[in-house]
Amino acid sequence: MGISSRNVVEGTARAPHRAMYKAMGLTDDDLSKPFVGVCHTGNEATPCNIHLPGLAQKAKDGVKDAGATPREFSTIAVSDGIAMGHEGMKSSLVSREVIADSIELMVRAHQYDALVGIAGCDKSLPGTMMAMARLNIPSVFVYGGTIMPGMLDGKELTVVDVYEAVGSYDAGKISLEELKNIEDNACPNAGSCGGMFTANTMASISEAIGIALPGSASPPAEDARREDIVYETGKACGRLIELGIKPSDIFTIDAFENAITMLNAVGGSTNGILHLLALANEAKIKLSYDDFERIRKRTPHLADMKPGGEYVMNSLDKVGGIPLIMKKLLDNNLIHGDALTVTGKTIKDNLQNVKISAEQKIVRSIENPLHNVGTAVILKGTLAPDGAVIKTAGMEMTKFTGKAKVFDSEETAFDSVAKGEIDEGDVLVIRYEGPKGGPGMREMLATTAAIVGQGLGKKVAMVTDGRFSGGTRGFMVGHVAPEAFVGGPIALVKNDDEISVNIEDNSINLQVSKDELEKRSKEWRMPKPNYESGALSKYAFLVGSAADGATTDPDNFLKMSKHLRDNMLTHID
């Protein structure tokens, strides 16, 4: 039996069910129509999501005007900015799975016919889209919108400027008063972080992959157009029911290639790689690091966006938003124009009336890109046999070789940076922060921003099995796999080992002999889990490799057991 509201409201046996709906004000006429779940991730945990309950009302209006019955519900959302730099960040990536699971459970329990998903902060976007792919009922995603930039002394600010200012203060470069002024002015209102960080990256991807309406990614959260966009999203979902279009019709391999192209064209967050792998898993599309590299190498970097560039999402919106970038890519045969979208039309149809203006500096032409190839780079080598990622937007270096300084947690690394113990030429290795080891694969923005704030952003490198915020810049390599907790080579690194990273040949190598690594491997012991009960413990038990999107699946435990057996790493302390 498929998911259908008729399973709940039709027949004499469903009289009790109808009675409960009537207790909430529904009529027999309402019950005769398709039910559309309107899910939002609104809460008071983050400015990214605080306005979403209000937007949900506009989506419900759109659903009603499309001839369906809306049913509002909400789910959790973690604020990455507020969880950053402490134990709370371990909950962030875990929340992606909880969001997807909770939306699935609500829809299955109540048998909603279709779904509108409204999300703001980082993990709530992929989590919502993953649920749509998993449920495969007519669905439309809509972003809550970006925050406006803060302004101080004529300069646009984002929350990343505050993180970097902390590093500048620790280094004695700015006063406490200057730090306070940046803090007070960086985040003026509701909306997700303003640069091409993870939320705006995934919003851009939502348009490119076809699950969101054209032009829905860039308007700010408190712009009057945002309510209109959400209303139209509700109407579009009603039309999809009539057309019978489901996520499986939209989430094709061509759509994922379009998404990867967008990720690189905007210089987006490396988290986009992780989330697209997870979304592809839900959509049953085979996607690997090889696909990301193949598409990256043919995609020019066009949008000059923070953190590596100069502009914020609001600036991109003023010159045409994501449709402008997609039109440039389409006109040069760099995206698949025949991919279906939630409008019921193709990408090419949606972009037919988009005009390209030459008088702007934010989005370059194909002939004069910021970089000739994309910026979301996959690395492999003796330190990361299964892969690692680095974002090259705004970077000048393509190679780095240095001596390792090893830390077994983010906190110890941050303390070392704050105390001025990091020297030019160092490679900070932060490990046991992977999907299982953390667990939750924490983002390292507090540490990376402190490095940049101290003026070391171009003088040191970082390598971790954790993640980086979309706001991170510098020579920072994340998602190292296999992770330290399962005995990956990163677990075997010692202080002063030489590490080499070369973006030109996609390599990341630990300059230690094979014999020495085998010796260290035999001596290595798996540490005890950081959590033995609760959500983080369950997540660590089920989560897989970052190279596969860090998804949760019972098979992942079996895969880890096989990995340990194959590598004779069966001793657990």
Image (cartoon, rainbow, N blue to C red):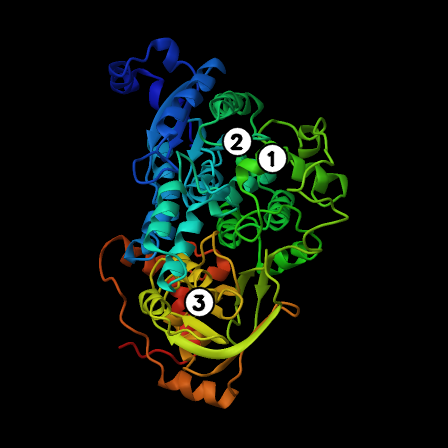
- The N terminus sits in image quarter: top left
Q: In this figure, which residue is indicated by the disc labeled 3?
A: 464
Mark 1 closeness class: few <14, some 14–19, many ≥20 residues within 10 Å: many
Mark 1 and mark 3: Cα distance apart in space: 33 Å
Hey, what amino acid is under mark 1? Gly
- Does 348 sit above or below residue 95? above
Judged from the image, the secondary structure of the residue bearing numbered disc 2 is loop
Judged from the image, the secondary structure of the residue bearing numbered disc 3 is strand
| Front residue of this view, candidates 186 and 27 | 186
| Horizontal side of residue 95 vs 340, given as left or right | left
The residue at 65%/44% (across/down) is: 254
Mark 3 closeness class: few <14, some 14–19, many ≥20 residues within 10 Å: many
Mark 2 and mark 1: Cα distance apart in space: 8 Å
Residue 237: x percent and y percent? 50, 25
- Does 432 sit above or below residue 444? below
Query: Can residue 442 be seen by looking at this rendering?
Result: no
Hey, what amino acid is under mark 3? Thr
Q: Earlier in the sequence, mark 3 or mark 2?
A: 2
**Which of labels 1 and 3 is toward the front?**
1
Q: In this figure, which residue is indicated by the disc labeled 2?
A: 219
| Front residue of this view, candidates 508 and 566 | 508
Hey, what amino acid is under mark 2? Pro
The image quarter in which residue 336 lies: top right
Mark 3 and mark 2: Cα distance apart in space: 34 Å
Q: In this figure, which residue is indicated by the disc labeled 1?
A: 321
Mark 2 closeness class: few <14, some 14–19, many ≥20 residues within 10 Å: many
| Horizontal side of residue 334 vs 432, given as left or right | right
Image marks 3 and 2: residues in contact by CB distance under 8 Å:
no
Q: Name, please, the residue furthest toward the left.
A: 533
Image marks 1 and 3: residues in contact by CB distance under 8 Å:
no
- Does 41 sit above or below residue 418? above
